[in-house]
Amino acid sequence: MQGAQYEDLRRHAVRGLMDLDHEARSEGRRGFGGFGIGGALEKENLGTIVGWVTDELPVDMPRHLLGISEPDDIFTAVEAGADTFDCVAPTRLGRRGGVYTLDGRMNLAGARFKRDFRGVDEEFGGYVSENYSRAYIHHLLKAKEFLAGTLCTMHNLEFMIRLVDNIRAAIDAGDYEAYRDEFLGRYYAGR
């Protein structure tokens, strides 16, 4: 569903797609299996815009949000009714040496990582943190080795997947708000 930051356009787009879905189903065709929410989502209005769309959609059909980039976007989208997400941010960030950590983002291209032999985020763990040091990835970045971007991307994708898994578990356990506040408080503490 498109419509930028305009509520009337967003709701109109949803209703038009719902009409197409109902028409297809009434004719014995499949209709839509779910819906994608995208296009010009201003970060400060993300929850409001997603809410306009999800208000119009049936609760039993998946709602996929395109274009999120930071952990707070995922929490905002979940609260507004989105089910799944995608974005190029974890890979774009990784190609340049940026990584997500429990304590916020950092860029391993920085000189301070030249002799830092810890894993990317040892508390988080994961394949990259358990097998490669910050210093090694820093070296790869400075040498312009493609492996650097690959390792950072692998770490970022694992980070985001685990974050969504943890959100799901917190919802199931009835601890969502506490998990959100703890995670975001730590992630953004350095800002």
Image (cartoon, helix red, strand yellow):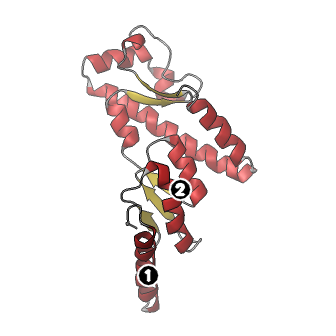
Q: Amino acid at mark 1?
A: Asp
Q: Earlier in the sequence, mark 2 or mark 1?
A: 1
Q: Amino acid at mark 2?
A: Gly
Q: Nearer the viewer, residue 41 or 8?
A: 8
Task: Locate residue 39, reporting x and y percent.
Answer: 36, 59
Q: Nearer the viewer, residue 22 or 56?
A: 56
Quadrant in the rendering for residue 41: bottom left
Q: Which residue is mark 1?
A: 21
Q: Is residue 98 visible?
A: yes
Q: Is residue 18 left or right of residue 123?
A: left
Q: Is residue 68 above or below residue 5?
A: above
The label nearer to you, 2 versus 1, is 2
Residue at position x 47%, y 11% in the image: 117
Residue at position x 38%, y 15% in the image: 136
Q: Is residue 2 above or below residue 23?
A: above
Quadrant in the rendering for residue 77: bottom right
Q: Which residue is mark 2?
A: 47
Q: Residue furthest top?
A: 115
Task: Locate residue 185, reporting x and y percent.
Answer: 63, 33
Q: Is residue 112 above or below residue 40?
A: above
Task: Locate residue 156, reporting x and y percent.
Answer: 45, 35
